[in-house]
Image (cartoon, rainbow, N blue to C red):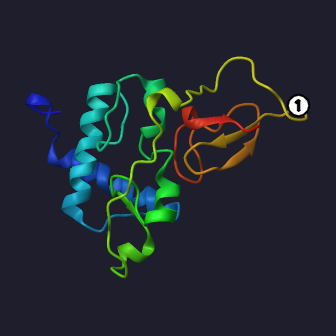
Amino acid sequence: MTPAGSVSPGAIDALRARLDREAESAGYHLNPDLDFTRGLAEGLLVNEGRYGYRACPCRLARGIADADRDIVCPCDYRDADLVEWGSCFCGLYVSDEIRRGQKTLTSVPERRPPAAERRVTKAEGPLPRLDGTRVWRCRVCGYLCARERPPAVCPICKATSDRFEIFR
């Protein structure tokens, strides 16, 4: 970080390149507007410095990891937004049609429920078992796996283990 909480251009470009590699390897696409995605990457880095995690820069984070877990990039709402609108709420991830210029980017309505309706889940403590094995679901992409603990990183969307919940 540079003075006044700003982020170095090198850090922004490195994160943007990493997000692009990870997105493409998992079948997703970043917005082709380089300046736009650099701005979002900067916001993610600012939020990481502020909160310790990369909360979506287009949403108001509370600074409480468990309360904000659903808006840590990639957020829990990305896939549904991509299917319905062709992009996620902030426009970082876009459909192939938007990436190729066959469809235009539009504003995406907020699908995150109000705070009072959100459930906070943690992959800790005594957990139910299904035939002796826990089944974990990635809250971001829906990936399921049966194992004692969730994977450290989702093999599909690269979300971290704290983004998994018990699948019931």
Q: Is residue 24 above or below residue 156?
A: below
Q: Residues within 10 Å of mark 1 (few under 14, many from 20)?
A: few
Quadrant where the image shows the C terminus: top right
For residue 128, side relative to residue 152 (left or right): right
Residue for point 55% across, 36% down: 163
Dot 1 falls on a residue whose secondary structure is loop
For residue 64, side relative to residue 2 (left or right): right
Residue for point 65% across, 21% down: 124
What is the quadrant of residue 132 in the picture? top right
Residue 28 visible in the snapshot:
no
**What amino acid is labelled 1 in the image?**
Gly
Depth check: 86 or 111 in front? 111
Instruction: Give residue 65's position: percent from left, percent from top.
Output: 44, 25
Depth check: 121 or 146 in front? 121
Instruction: Give residue 48's position: percent from left, percent from top.
Output: 31, 33
Depth check: 167 or 8 in front? 167
Instruction: Give residue 14's position: percent from left, percent from top.
Output: 28, 50
What is the quadrant of residue 136 in the picture? top right
In this rendering, the count of numbered labels is 1
Instruction: Give residue 101's position: percent from left, percent from top.
Output: 33, 79
Taking the view exactly as shown, the residue that stands out farthest to the right is 131
Taking the view exactly as shown, the residue that stands out farthest to the left is 3
Residue for point 30% across, 68% down: 32
Q: Is residue 73 above or below residue 69?
A: below
For residue 165, side relative to residue 85 (left or right): right
What is the quadrant of residue 153 in the picture? top right
**Which residue in the structure is indicated by mark 1?**
132
